[in-house]
Image: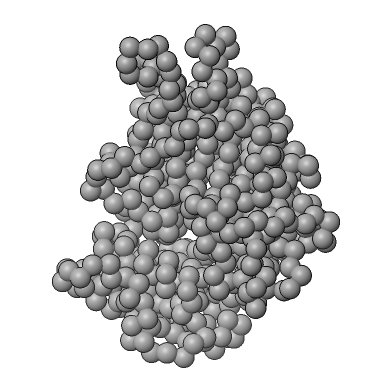
Amino acid sequence: MGSGAWKIEKRDHFRSDSFKEVDNVLENGSLSIIVLGASGDLAKKKTFPALFHLFKQGFLNPNEVHIFGYARTKISDDELRSRIRGYLIQGASSKESEDVTKFLQLIKYVSGSYDGEEGFRLLDKEIAVHEVSKNSADGTSRRLFYLALPPSVYPSVCGMIKNYCMNKSDLGGWTRIVVEKPFGKDLESAEKLSNQIGHLFDESQIYRIDHYLGKELVQNLLVLRFANRFFLPLWNRDNIENVQIVFREDFGTEGRGGYFDEYGIIRDIIQNHLLQVLCLVAMEKPVSLKPEHIRDEKVKVLQSVLPINDDEVVLGQYDGYRDDPTVPDRSNTPTFSTVVLRIHNERWEGVPFILKAGKALNSRKAEIRVQFKDVPGDIFRCKKQGRNEFVIRLQPSEAMYMKLTVKQPGLEMSTVQSELDLSYGQRYQGVTIPEAYERLILDTIKGDQQHFVRRDELKAAWEIFTPLLHRIDNGELKPLPYKPGSRGPAEADALLEKAGYVQTHGYIWIPPTL
């Protein structure tokens, strides 16, 4: 057996043993999942449905698991269950209804403030009652705190958890916390928040969740890049002209104007979601699939990004955004942005990474578009038809396809653009693609931090964008107006062209029908 085969076999062996260990851990000791902010929209729309789907698939054993909701709202257990139920039922089948009823019986509600001892002492008492009822051996119980809360209350809530709700020992048990973005508004506030939480918990206990890292096609990036031979020699500045990472929504802020105006599109989407995707596209092969090895490589990418040039930024704000009564009349907050990032290393020197996000545009999609260089010595004179592109469609209609030039069928020797297409809805019929939150919550239970943001990674990300954000906040950079339902400001297309992107005219990818 060759050395390469031995390495692959050893790595596979390591991974399978790791998952066996995880499975065993799931079978030992009680598991308490505490959703703080249980009466809020995030908990109702994302957290509880994700827990329900894990329960339905057998990942949450009712003999081990109990779920606690905690919030300031004074309601009963049944009132919380009633509020959640409508977000869980997707069909009218009796089996579905039965599963929902069983799941809801696992939920208990505790009311209390986010900075008061009394409420958290009561929460700890209720958790302890559950642990005793499950006959958990001392030190084996597990407590997972999901903070579905605004970051402003993270420090006080984490302090209360540390003082009053920790697992009492660590004989196989643990206490972990999950925190949602935004992790600060700039480098200084992010570091302050990291210091406040880091003073209370070890990094191994903190799971900074970015749901984009739980998306199926994002998780496929490492496999695509490092398990397929034909990508290895192509994935560099010698062959790739530019990379676009795009997020588009066809609706505006819709009632979230006041909240959104505090952050804007760069803080809301680009600095976290799109930058995380960039790391996976651009990183070097990690030593192994261990979480720390993967996150080490992501940090190296971020630390190689050059300061952003104002000439490579276009900001936009859609007409009517300020009509929202919760938005200031003179708001300078961008609802659209195109930013060109440049990575100063051997692989990517000279290749623009174009991050583009916007609201109230003409379509809804998120995708990665890798555009290759022109074919040298083009004997078919087909350059006008467009370049080869590898596109990964993250949402909707998950797919990956390769745009390439082929002969037009017929007697003439003419060329046309077509695609090699892997559309998940067609290829994997009957396979349910899990929601990102399901996957990430399961990872927190397993103790796998691969798809969560490490503290130094967060710091490096804010170092890239903080100077630009401060210039916007100070009014030095102004967003350009654009019409809802358009592509955004025309200047953004001009920036793409300046960065070297060549648009394909006359070709539209159409998802295949089943």
Question: In this picture, is 164 found above or below 411?
Answer: below
Could you say which quadrant of the image residue 402 lies in? top left
Is residue 184 something that shows in the picture? no
Question: Which residue sits at x=31%, y=39%?
Answer: 512
User: Splitting the image into 4 quarters, where does residue 410 fall?
Assistant: top left
Q: Nearer the viewer, residue 485 or 31?
A: 485
Residue 11 locus on image (x, y percent): 40, 32
In the visual, does 377 lie left or right of 63?
right
> Could you say where residue 199 lies in the image, as x and y percent from the top left?
67, 65
Image quarter in which the N terminus is found: top left
Q: Residue at x 34, y 81 (%)?
A: 81
Left or right of 370? Residue 476 is right
Q: Nearer the viewer, residue 467 or 253?
A: 253
Q: State the quadrant of the C terminus.
A: top left
Q: How many labels were placed on the picture?
A: 0
- Horizontal side of 148 relative to 50 (left or right) equals right
